[in-house]
Image (tube, helix red, strand yellow):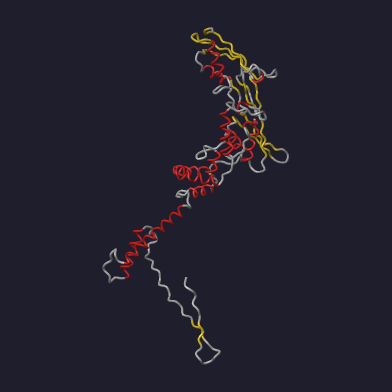
Amino acid sequence: MAADPVPELLFDGQCPDCGRRQVDLPDTLPDVGDDFDWDLRDYDGFRLFMLQELAARFPERRRWTPADVEVALVEVLAFALDQLSDSLDRAAAESYLESARRPESLRRLLKLIGYDVAGLAKRLRDKPFDTLGEAESKVALSATDITYFDNWWLDHPEKMDQARLDGPRAIHDQHRMVTLGDFEVRLEEHPLVLRAHAWERWDGAWSTVHVAIIPWQRLGLDADGVYSDAVWAETAAFHAERALYLAARADLPSVRAVLYPYLEAYRMVGQEVVLEAAVEVGIQIIVSIQVDADYFQSEIRHAVDRALGTGPGGFFEPGRLRFGEDLWASDLYQVLMALDGVNNVCLNRFKRLGDGFSDQSASGRIALEGLEVAICDNDPLRPARGYFTLALHGGRKG
């Protein structure tokens, strides 16, 4: 910038005490014309515009060649302006999610909407952190991890494009349990929860949310957790994806201990949540089956055991029946009559276990309510958990 003008005091010789201040002001700048195309962004556009200005300012000159000093200066300026314009466009593009090209810019923009893509990849032991151990994956991101992740992204730009899509979608995911329906839906997403039922109870000073669940393999809420490899792997991935604490498998954490960090992270502030177990109702069933003449009775017995069992697809598979869902004899007829080799079915006894409950084979309905869930494990060592007795007629012996 030009220096400010320095005033000068002049005395014309009349009065020694009188003088005048004189300032030499610079010439006023010429008006900027409005014919400049502000959309110019490339070398050709800048070069053409400056050559047109030269031709307009010096109309007497009819010929301009690349060897002229003026043309050479124009081309050098056009080259510099083209680089500056490209740098400006690149810098502006890094401010938007769709156009950001640098890994650090994309990570920063995604983190502004709550999507920590690098931290999520490390917790899930996804690439490039797929070689980390379980303990290492739970450690917070370090500067080395971030640099490693950015370099991996530069080698796999398709993963950056995928993150552009996944980040905004994650905004629509519900991250809080607000309504009773939220508690049921969110808890049933956990690998250890088969069914969940929530209700609200006034405790005299405030309302408490109570949630009854049917855990995996009907484990007790506070019993030692002995989980299969597949279920534990799903649970570990579920907690890692949401950055939730998970106790070591060797400590045999109970279902309540595993679910507690999940509830603490997703419940509303000041909202107390109490986990409760389902009320399991043992069912006694005695059924007579007419076997087709071309089938062995042993085949039908095995088929009925599977159809009414607690294994995958069985009628009494844990989690298949909902809380308070009535048990209907018609559903049993439908399951048994669908088996090959079964000609006819007669339900001789259909009741809740206990002398205080009557047989419902005539009415065809065992009424359940509230937190009650029908069970029939058919385990001779635990008859209180329900059992069924088969009387097979016809067919082949063996």
Residue 257: x and y, percent?
65, 34
Residue 104: x and y, percent?
50, 49
Residue situated in front as seen by the camera: 309 or 208:
309
Residue 95: x and y, percent?
48, 53
Q: Quadrant of residue 304?
A: top right
Asked whether the viewer can see residue 352, the reply is yes
Considering only vertical position in the picture, is 248 above or below 2? above
Considering only vertical position in the picture, is 60 above or below 238? below
Residue situated in front as seen by the camera: 117 or 198:
117
Say how many tags the image has: 0
The residue positioned farthest toward the right in the image shown:
204
Locate residue 15 relative to residue 281 in the image: left or right.
left
Considering only vertical position in the picture, is 294 above or below 202? above
Q: Which residue is drawn at the image coordinates 67% and 43% (left, top)?
A: 270
Considering only vertical position in the picture, is 79 above or below 351? below
Locate residue 102 relative to residue 75 in the image: left or right.
right
Residue 120: x and y, percent?
54, 41
Residue situated in front as seen by the camera: 382 or 131:
131
Residue situated in front as seen by the camera: 371 or 141:
141
Q: Quadrant of residue 122?
A: top right
Asked whether the viewer can see residue 171, the reply is no
Q: Which residue is drawn at the image coordinates 40% and 69% (left, top)?
A: 32
